[in-house]
Image (tube, rainbow, N blue to C red):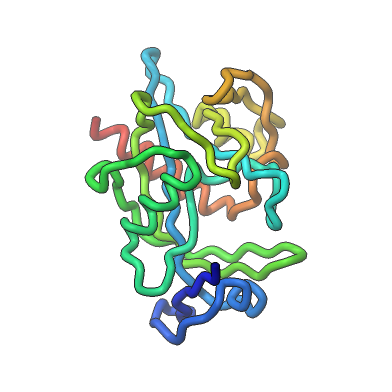
Amino acid sequence: MTEWLQVFDHRGNPLDVKKRNEIHRDGDWHETFHCWFYEINADGHLYLFFQKRARDKAEFPSLYDISAAGHIEAGENIIQAGSREIYEELGISVWKDALKSIGTYKEELSSDTLKDREFCRVYLTPYPAEHVFSLGKEVEDVIRVEINGFNQVLKGAKESTDASSVIDNRKFRAGYRDFVPHDQAYYEFVIQAILEEVEKL
């Protein structure tokens, strides 16, 4: 099925509507939904959740990425798009009241196959431990990583950090190259927002 996305200029003003593959080919600005799951365990440690992209994905296969994310189709409400992506990728339903907007981040990602310029509509939500993930075909695993450990890897202070699968409890070490190469500033934007959100609890 063809995905039609709204195109924007670099200031965020809407222009025309184009097919997703054309947008990635031409490097047009468009909208995406990003949702980060976080959790505080009984010992007070704060965790961030990443999905593992399927090995047959065209971009960044088998790397760890945003908990749930996807494109906002032309004319689609952000929350509707987000709820759809969370369900398609993780198999769970999240109430809109549980989604906390932390704003928009402009990001540019490139690979051999795309020029991706996004207005990322970024949201946070507590990890819904009462729900069991049912992974979609685009996702191979969901892992939790202690946020301070990930931050140290991000800044080059550590080569790797402890990680564990939410699906099968497998434990391992994850290094910088195991994660999708988002801007460091993007990751810092998300981490700071989660720390501020947790302080309110």
Q: Is residue 61 left or right of residue 21?
A: right
Q: Is residue 119 left or right of residue 140?
A: left
Of residue 53 and residue 34, the one placed in the foreground of this image is 53
Q: Position of residue 185 (x, y in %)?
A: 53, 53
Of residue 11 and residue 53, the one placed in the foreground of this image is 53
Q: Residue at x 42, y 27 (%)?
A: 132
Q: How many marks on residues?
A: 0
Q: Quadrant of residue 109?
A: bottom right
Q: Quadrant of the C terminus?
A: top left
Q: Residue at x 43, y 79 (%)?
A: 11
Q: Position of residue 150 (x, y in %)?
A: 57, 33
Q: Residue at x 37, y 14 (%)?
A: 42
| Residue extending farthest bottom | 16
| Residue extending farthest front | 1
Q: Is residue 189 left or right of residue 153?
A: left
Q: Is residue 118 above or below residue 84?
A: below
Of residue 19 and residue 15, the one placed in the foreground of this image is 19
Q: Residue at x 70, y 57 (%)?
A: 58
Q: Is residue 114 above or below residue 70?
A: below
Q: Position of residue 74 (x, y in %)?
A: 41, 74
| Residue extending farthest right | 112
Q: Is residue 17 left or right of residue 22?
A: left
Q: Position of residue 1 (x, y in %)?
A: 54, 67
Q: Is residue 166 above or below residue 29?
A: above
